[in-house]
Amino acid sequence: MPGGQSGSGERTAARLAAVQALYQISITGVSADGVIGEFIEHRFGREIDGLVYEGADRAFFEDLVRGVTTRDAEITTQVQSALDKSRDLDRLEKILAAVLRAGTFELLTRIDVPARVVISEYVDVAHAFFEGPQPGFVNGVLDKLARQVRSAEMAGQTQKGAA
């Protein structure tokens, strides 16, 4: 993940931290507020295990973590609808599920961020955790979701790309 943080780099760091926080919540059952507090107090402003938390947009991080946990049922339904019928979100690796949940939340609620940017950012986050096919899987699932929940935006980008 990028180390120098400014502008969108602050959001990139926040996305990475949010995915890790969501993973931690899924493993430990600790509340979103508890995990957010731990990240702000003990991780932000540091590099831990090669992952940079310096310069993360804290408000954006908090919005992602709280939003995903608050809208969990809706997000689960959305992600499941984009998965192949033979896959179940609850059976995916927990970190992979956290990437998909955060990306889905952002596609649903953060219309200030273009869908292609959301997809690209979460593919990059997936690359921080996986070297295999998982980043491509994230790309496919989030692209399918974006076409469902932001159909007009995605259609406009497709038409621009074809010109």
Image (tube, rainbow, N blue to C red):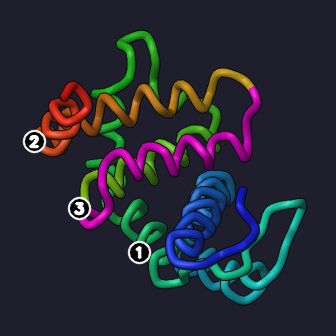
Residue type beneath disc 3 = Ile
**Pick the front one: 69 or 8:** 8
Badge 3 or badge 2: first in the primary sequence: 3
Residue type beneath disc 1 = Asp
Query: Is residue 29 visible in the rendered structure shown here?
Result: no
Q: Identify the secondary structure beneath mark 2.
A: helix
Q: Which mark is residue 63?
A: 1
Q: Residues within 10 Å of mark 2 (few under 14, many from 20)?
A: few
Residue in the picture at 44% in, 48% down: 101
Residue at which label 3 appears: 111
For the residues labelled 1 and 3, say whether their Cβ atoms are less than 8 Å apart: no
Where's residue 119, x and y in %? 43, 43
- Specify start and end residues of the magenta stretch as a single range: 110-131
State the residue lying farthest toward the left. Answer: 152
Q: Which mark is residue 152?
A: 2
Residue in the picture at 21% in, 25% down: 162
Quadrant, the N terminus: bottom right
Q: Residues within 10 Å of mark 1 (few under 14, many from 20)?
A: some
Query: Is residue 57 visible in the rendered structure shown here?
Result: yes
Is 123 placed above or below 92 here? below
Q: Identify the secondary structure beneath mark 3.
A: loop
Q: CA distance from mark 1 to mark 3?
A: 14 Å
**Pick the front one: 147 or 36:** 147
Q: CA distance from mark 1 to mark 2?
A: 25 Å
Q: Quadrant of residue 41?
A: bottom right
Badge 1 or badge 2: first in the primary sequence: 1
Q: CA distance from mark 3 to mark 2?
A: 12 Å
Is 58 placed above or below 121 here? below
Is 119 placed above or below 15 here? above
Q: Quadrant of residue 94?
A: top right
Where's residue 49, x and y in %? 89, 61
